[in-house]
Image: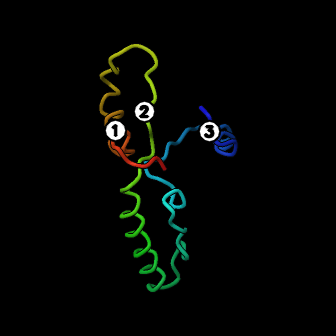
């Protein structure tokens, strides 16, 4: 699928697969926050909250997935329809946005 080598190694070592539902900050031209959890005082928490609000605002301009093609039989199995629909909505797959 063309995944990053480090991501492939992580998936193999953890025997799991995770997909992002939102873009990485640097793919939206946003720097990482200057503070990290656990916060040592409320000032750092406020700084992070401000960064998070900016991230949410900026990330709305990007999509995480792009639908290229379908494989296998159609339609989607009924047990998976809701999951696929939620994934597509959260990742912006059908929106005309910049791919992050």
**Pointer 1 with pointer 2, Cβ within 8 A:** yes
Q: Residue furthest top?
A: 73
- The percent position of residue 22, horizontal first and vertical second, equals 44, 52
Residue topped by disc 1: 94
Quarter of the image that includes the N terminus = top right
Residue topped by disc 3: 3
* Element on which disc 3 rests: loop
Residue at the (44%, 84%) spot, across then down: 42
* Element on which disc 1 rests: loop
Q: What is the distance, in whole Å, between disc 1 and disc 2 at their CAs?
A: 8 Å
Q: Which mark is residue 14?
A: none
**Pointer 3 with pointer 1, Cβ within 8 A:** no
**Pointer 2 with pointer 3, Cβ within 8 A:** no
Residue at the (53%, 82%) spot, across then down: 40
* Element on which disc 2 rests: loop
- Residue 40 is left or right of residue 61, and the answer is right
Query: What's the colour scheme?
Result: rainbow
| Mark nearer the N terminus (2 vs 3) | 3
Q: What is the distance, in whole Å, between disc 2 and disc 3 at their CAs?
A: 16 Å
55 shown above or below 74: below
Residue at the (54%, 76%) spot, across then down: 35
Query: Which is more foreground, mark 3 or mark 1?
Result: 1
- The percent position of residue 38, horizontal first and vertical second, equals 53, 74
| Mark nearer the N terminus (3 vs 1) | 3
Nearer the observer, 85 or 100: 100
Residue topped by disc 2: 67
Give the class, few, some or many, for how many residues have Cα within 10 Å of label 2's Cα (few <14, many ≥20): few
Residue at the (54%, 68%) spot, across then down: 31
- The percent position of residue 12, horizontal first and vertical second, equals 67, 37
Query: Which is more foreground, mark 2 or mark 3?
Result: 2
61 shown above or below 74: below
Nearer the observer, 12 or 87: 87
């Amino acid at each position: 699928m063309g995944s990053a080598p480090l991501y492939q190694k992580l998936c193999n070592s953890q025997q799991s697969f995770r997909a992002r539902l939102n873009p990485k900050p640097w793919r939206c031209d946003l720097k990482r926050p200057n503070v990290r959890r656990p916060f040592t005082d409320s000032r750092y928490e406020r700084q992070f909250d401000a960064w998070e609000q900016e991230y949410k605002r900026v990330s709305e301009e990007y999509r995480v997935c792009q639908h290229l093609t379908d494989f296998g039989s159609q339609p989607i199995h009924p047990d998976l329809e809701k999951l696929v629909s939620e994934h597509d909505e959260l990742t912006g797959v059908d929106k005309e946005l910049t791919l992050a």
